[in-house]
Each structure stands twice: as structure tokens, then as C-alpha cells.
Amino acid sequence: MALELKQQLKLSQQLVMTPQLQQAIKLLQLSRMELVDLVREEMVENPVLEDGLDSGPEKEAPSGEERGGEDMSLEGVEAERPPPAEAPGDRPETTSEVKADEGAVKEIDWDHYLENYSMAPPMPSYRATSEELPSIENTLTRKPSLFDHLVWQLKLTSMRKTEEQIGMLIIGNLDPDGYLKDATIEEIAAEAEVTPEHAERVMQRIQEFDPVGVAARNLQECLLIQARHAGEDDEIVVRIIEDHMGNLERKNYQAIARDLKQPLEEIYEAVKVIASFHPKPGRLYSEEEPVYITPDVYVHKVGDKYFVVPNDDGLPKLKISNFYRTALSGSPQAREYIQDKLRSAQWLIRSIQQRQRTIIKVTESIVKFQREFFDKGINYLKPLILRDVAEDINMHESTISRVTTNKYVHTPQGIFELKFFFNSGINRTDGDEIASESVKNKIRDIIAKEDSRKPFSDQKIVELLRDQGIDIARRTVAKYREQLGILSSSKRKQLF
């Protein structure tokens, strides 16, 4: 068989992930805080970018025709929004399109571009009229951690150097709840080159530090330490902790009374004392701080209409520095370097603009689907999936997923993550569907109104929901209850 070479012409379409497209996709899925960090990092690495807040008074922005260049601000996105560009992932980009676009960027007359751009407002242009910054006293302090608090007490004791070393090893191995679970006392003793008995004595001294009960190896030991420290010599309290932790957790007080041969009232009084102890003493010095959420967009109701407004407060007002305009007339090497940085800055500003437009467009679609929620509250939340919004605004589901992750919206009903509005449906007895989040809210309301002495079982909650026209299985109620962090009926029951 003879071998021969042939030429074939084949036309195909493929997705080419250019650096600019990768940057647009990356920006789209960033949270607000991550975007701020990325922009500030770009401002450090790219000298062409600067924050408009630091560049003095801004000139009034002329119209697009007067500028003759590209509009680099977000002003007017809501009032007169042009058709937004397709978000990343909505359509494939062919090789020819990429080359043509790159060629167009290289042919930009930067002198003419910067001359017109200097009159444009920095991006973003929307900013609150007043900004109140916290005082310096509120920014220079932090809450002491459990480790710092225990080390401070350790330094105040009169321990020898070897004992202090053992104490540091014990404190360093405590978990956030204050328990010694990451290492055994034998392992600590071996590392400090002392006997386990020596390490045990140091641990007992640390267990008396504030908060009392730290460095315990389990819940039982933690409660016993607190009982002895509180001066509870009551034999009933100690025996319940030592011998009846299982019955205590199940609230089986009758079994405890029978075994200890004590009246039930005495057991109740002892349990009240145990309930006053802290089961996780380390949490009193938790380093977890409250998370303050800044919404990406606002939904305002004016009359009978809802308007979506971007929140650019706190974001750097990006603009291209005019300082580098004069440097374009310098050496070829300098001109090439500055042009490369100008292209990078231009793509960053474009990507942020596209990100903002896409978030607004997705939010507007959510408002359209969930109008009853915005009017009446969470009980009127409808089932919604990513495909519904994707088809409504002609974008890909992956784009909707990126946009709704770690993005928050301020609504008349409160602040919610955009993903909150996407829920599976639960059937109603009348044939309609209700969102799963609405069902969770109804379960929460039912449990909040129950008699704490006779809490509702999961089956009873099923029956109460069925009376409201919601058809749901008992195991689904149990799953939603656990997701809400609500205990079972036996553990919710209060006898005193």
C-alpha cells in the first residue's frame, strides 16, 4: 500500500480561552471583598491604574460623543443601560475573532485615547454622598484569643521553666472549644521529656485557669472541674456527672432518680446546677468575629415598581493615570511597556463593567420571578432553578451560577445571598408547588410556637403542614429541622 500526503480544508468552531476571557470569568465569580483585594493588587502592580478618590476634584463627564472614546464609568447603568455584552460562557469565541480583537487593541491611538479619557469620570462613579469611617480607637484593637488569654495567665504563675514549657505544649494543643483532644498527655510528656505524672499535674493547674474547665479531655471531665470549682460538694451533682451522662443527655431524669434513690425534685435541682456550667469554655474567647455583609446590589421599591441599583461604595474608583501620557513619547521600550500596561488596565475596567452589568441583569430577572417574595415575605418564595433565569436573560447556567455565588442583595425583606432565591419545590395538596426555604420557615414558626413541655414530633409537624396544604414526608421534615439546627422533640423537651 502506497503512502501519500493530502491536504484537507476543515472549518470548525472552538472556544479559545484568551487571557482577557479568563480574567472576565475570574472577576465574575469573585465576592465583593475578593474583588476589592484583586483591584488593589492590580493597582499596586500596574502603575497606569489609580484610584479616582486620590486624584483630586473630578471634572464633569461629557457625553459619549464629546469624549470620542470608550465610556469607562458605571454611571448611567441603571438609567440608560445599553444592551449588555454576553457574559463569559454564553457563546464560543473563534480564533479569528480573537486575532481580530487583539489586532484592534494594538492599533489603538493611545495619545488620542488618553486625551479623550481624561475627561471621563473614574470607574465606578456611583458612590454614597457621605462616608463615615470608624474612629482610630475602633480599628486598632482585637479580641484576645483563648491561646493569648491562657498564656498570659501561665506567665503570671510561679512555675519553673520546665513546667512552663509543658504548659505551653498543653495550651498549644487545645481546640477552639478548649478541649485537649489533638494530643494525649503521654505525647506531651514525651515531647517535653518529662513523666506523664508531671505533665498531668501541670494540666490540672491549667484546668483551674480562666475560663474554668479548659484543658479537659472530654465533656464529663470539663463539667466535673466546673462543679468542684463552684464548690458543689453535693454528691448528687457529682454522681450525675460521673455515672449518668447518657441519661442526662436524654433527659431521662426518672432513671437517674431511681438509681440514686432520690426524689425527682432533687434531681431537677441538681440538673439546673449542671445546666449553668459551660460545656465549651473555650468559646468564651472565640476568635470568630461577626461577619458584616455589604450587598453588591440594592433592590428599591418605588411605587409599584422595583429598581435594581449597583452598590459601588467601597470599591476603588478606577481611572487611568494621565501621568503616563507624556511617557508615551519617550523611548520605544518605555512606550511598549506603557502600552502593555494600558491594555491591561483597559481590560480590567471592561471586565469589572461587564461583571456589574451581569449581576444587575440576573438580579432583575430574580425580582421578576420572585415578585411575591419581595412584596409579602419568605412564605411566598417560589421554586426557582438556574435554568429559569438563564433562559430568561439568554445566558448560560454556568454564568448564572458564578454570578449568584457570594453575591448579596439588599431587599425590602432583608439582605440575602443571590443563591437564596433558587429553591427546589415541595408539592402542595392543591397541585401547586412551594419553595423549600418557605417550608423551612414554616417549620421554624411551628416549633417556635410549640409548648416546650410537649414539643411536636416530626410526624406531628407533617400533619400540621398538611393542614396548611403542604404535602411533605417525615424524613424531609427531619432533614430540614437538622439544617435549621433544631434538636429533636425529645431533646427540646423542658420539664422545669
Image: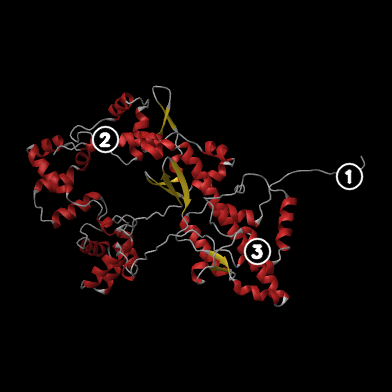
Residue type at tag 1: Lys
Residue toward you, 46 or 146? 46
Residue toward you, 252 or 492? 492
Residue 169: where, in percent of width, then height? 32, 65
Locate the C terminus by quadrant: top left
Residue toward you, 375 or 281? 375
Q: Secondary structure at mark 3?
A: helix
Outermost residue toward the top in this view: 430
Residue type at tag 3: Arg
- Name the side, left or right, on which 230 lies relative to 369: left
- Name the side, left or right, on which 154 lies relative to 272: right
User: Do the residues bearing badges 3 and 1 touch, measured as CB atoms within 8 Å?
Assistant: no
Of labels 2 and 1, earlier in sequence is 1
User: Do the residues bearing badges 2 and 1 touch, measured as CB atoms within 8 Å?
Assistant: no
User: Any mark on residue 284, and which?
Assistant: none
The count of marks equals: 3
How far apart, in angstroms, are the residues tagged by discs 2 and 1? 76 Å
Of labels 2 and 3, earlier in sequence is 3
User: Any mark on residue 343, and which?
Assistant: 3
How far apart, in angstroms, are the residues tagged by discs 2 and 3? 59 Å
State the residue position of label 1.
6
How far apart, in angstroms, are the residues tagged by discs 3 and 1? 42 Å
Asked if one can make out residue 294 in the rendered structure from this viewpoint, the answer is yes
Question: Which residue is drawn at the image coordinates 47% and 35% (left, top)?
Answer: 384
Judged by depth in the image, the label closer to the viewer, 3 or 1, is 3
Q: In the figure, residue 123 lies in which quadrant?
A: bottom right
State the residue position of label 2.
447
Q: Around disc 1, counting alpha carbons within 10 Å, would you say few (fewer than 14), some (14 to 19), or many (20 or more)?
A: few
Residue 259: where, in percent of width, then height? 12, 37
